Image: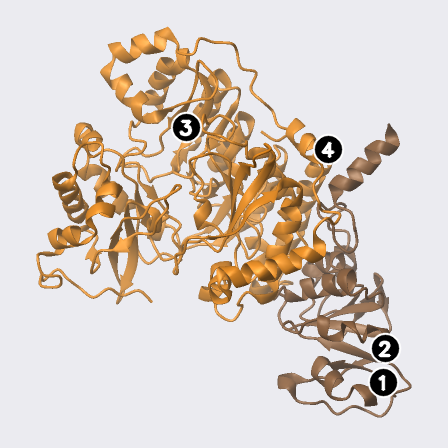
Chain colours: A orange, B brown
Amino acid sequence: MYIYDEIDQRLVDERVAQFRDQTRRFLAGKLTEDQFRPLRLRNGLYIQRYAPMLRIAVPYGILASRQLRVLAHITRTYDRGSGHFSTRQNLQLNWPRLEDVPEILAKLAKVQMHAIQTSGNCVRNITSDHFAGIAPDEIVDPLVWCEIVRQWSTFHPEFSYLPRKFKIAISGSVHDRTAVQLHDIGLQAVRDAAGEIGFRVLVGGGMGRTPMLGSVIREFLPWPHLLTYLEAILRVYNRYGRRDNIWKARIKILVKDRTPEGFRDEVEAEWAQIRDGASTLTQAEVERIAGRFTRPAYEKLDELASSYVLALGRDRRFAAWARRNVHAHKVGGYAAVTLSLKRTGVPPGDATADQMDAVADLADRYSFGELRVTHEQNLLLADVRQSDLYAIWQEAQALGLATPNVGTITNIISCPGGDFCSLANAKSIPVAEAIQRRFDDLDYVYDIGELDLNISGCMNSCGHHHIGHIGILGVDKQGAEFYQISIGGAQGNDASLGKVIGPSVSQEEVPDVVEKLIDVYLAHRDSELERFIEVVRRIGIEPFKEHVYGTHQGSKARARPVEVA
Amino acid sequence: MALIRDRKLAHDPWKLLDGAEGAQPSIPATGKVIVPLAAWKASREQLLSRADGVGVWLSAPDDPADIAADLGHLQVVAVHFASFNDGRGYSTARLLRERYGWRGELRATGDVLRDQLFYLARCGFDAFDLREGEDVDAALRAFGDFSEAYQASVDRPLPLFRRREARSVRTT
């Protein structure tokens, strides 16, 4: 992970002092709620349904064990003992007191953490691949570029009051695991024929009320120009993005209005004015940043640990876990391990303070003292010896972190929903739990195979329902909570947006509908190798629709009009 | 209203003329006036003949390119923030300073509050017409909120990484 230098630390400390003063002035009545709101949002603080929600940044998902212990301490001291890891690789606490937040931020700053720009109309936390630096299919390690962009975007004076929030993802592998097509800016690190690093630049992707895939506006941006090009994009957006309607303020709307080609021309014209300027990156700076990252001191191990292979043959349950939760590593003898936060009965992505402490210990003992937060709301030990996997599995089981379901229907990605969030139309957590209970037979789950199921409690799409193979969206119908079901969404290189199958259904009906969708899939797949998403793409949504609603769409009493504002 | 200029409380000899909804303000015969862009375009010759000096103010959607050629005739340029949440004026300021070479007074007017002063100053504003009710002493402290900055901007034309590199060359 990146280690702060004196200036990085000083800026975070000064931010704490600034927010302490702003909070004091707000509590003393010297700042109005309207004036204070954007200030607290830029420090991750929302006013939620029951209490404030504090979103703590986990830059590109990487944590040191000492940082996780502080998160555990904060969760225990200032919250009710449980935190929520989000799809944007951050940690959210749902019960801190406003008065305590400056102190929480001060404690975070002591371990090089913060909540800077985790909300508000500014550049948010940069997200990346949770396998960055270890993936066998990696072309470029994205982490150094993530940190460069983090520094550039932190307290950017020109882009701190944008029309709307702004999300940047950076991927460096063959298989995209960061949803680069669904960000305001997606950067795909690539190499040209000469081996030089550059970026394919996508803009205007996003979920929310108007989901869109991003458009490529530049096939290859040589790395020295990264910051000036970002500056050109942000400047065009800051000047011309809509500010009259919050639902049309994201950059995707501007890109659509101007057409991707028109938008690209505007960016290129702006860039022509500032390219080769002082913000052009230097080799020395890239090396300096790279040099501040800790790198695991890998041992020279056998490509495949024999004890691991023997354990796989000996213990069927261990083998099942390993098949789902252990991932390939580019260094021989090592593996990455998902510690699942998807146990049935626990809100997806939630971890208790005790679990956090225990995971910090696991990271210290087995993974060079570091871990990662995945956008699928799990934790990952990135650098473990294969020979330690059996021991890790046993410990993870005791901690309730060994649910062997990564990549399956019960590894549900879900926002906190109406139980906590004041934006939500409907609850998410009970829906996730009902589906997990319905699909509680692991053999059945494995037979269904790879399937992403995503739940969002409202159109803000924090649960990324648009890119779930099955997506579930909470909608409000005259005060009642209903759920709209879509299928065919996908993340990755062939990302696509799901299509709504029909009228929304009640909370009790959701597990039945999901089961019917699975029935259709199982009946139509040509073999176990054909995944749910592939069947949807091959046969279309009609057969699914018919099975869920009856042969004639709308003829069943269950059918109700869809209603989304 | 209090005016901060060059990080000090300052006397303000200028009169800002309103131009709401594009209506042409009536321009007093004498005195220093800052007129809206539309008034400048409509009455440029007349305004140029004044003895007392003239400035132009831009609203959030106004393009600073529209006055780039006229900057030599102006004594002050102002950028109006109808709401502190509308960040277009930050880009306007940088363009005036960095692209069009404006060296004179660049004033922020309207919803100008203590908690935005640091960023405004970084983008090139050197005069701040504080909103009614703002505490001047608190506002003056805002310029020191942060002692460093990563990015290049008007106040620091070199980004931190280039200043670090220059420093390490000097010390080795």
In this rendering, do the residues under marks 2 and 4 share a single chain? no
Q: Amino acid at mark 4?
A: Ala
Quadrant where the N terminus of chain A lies? top right
Q: CA distance from mark 1 to mark 4?
A: 51 Å
Mark pair 3, 4: CA separation = 40 Å
The Cα atoms of the two marked residues, 2 and 4, are separated by 44 Å
In the rendered image, which quarter contains the C terminus of chain A?
Answer: bottom left
Q: Which amino acid type is marked by label 2?
A: His
Q: Name the one closer to the observer, A121 or A113.
A: A121
Residue type indicated by callout 3: Gln
The span from disc 1 to disc 3 (Cα, nearest Å) is 72 Å
Q: Which residue is mark 1?
A: B48
In the depicted structure, whether residue B43 falls above or below residue A474: below
Which residue appears at 54% of the width and 55% of the height? A120
Residue at 26%, 11% in the rendered image? A313
Give the residue at mark 4.
A284
Residue extending farthest to the right is B51
Q: Chain of mark 3?
A: A
Please name the residue that numbered disc 3 is placed on. Answer: A355
| Residue corresponding to mark 2 | B73
User: Which circle's residue, 1 or 2, is located before the other in the chain?
Assistant: 1
What chain does mark 4 sit on? A
At label 1, the amino acid type is Leu
Chain to which the residue tagged by mark 1 belongs: B
Secondary structure under tag 1 reads: helix
> Where in the figure is residue A477, as x and y percent of width and height?
26, 64
Tell me the element at label 3.
helix
Does residue A465 sit above or below B19 in this rendering?
A: above
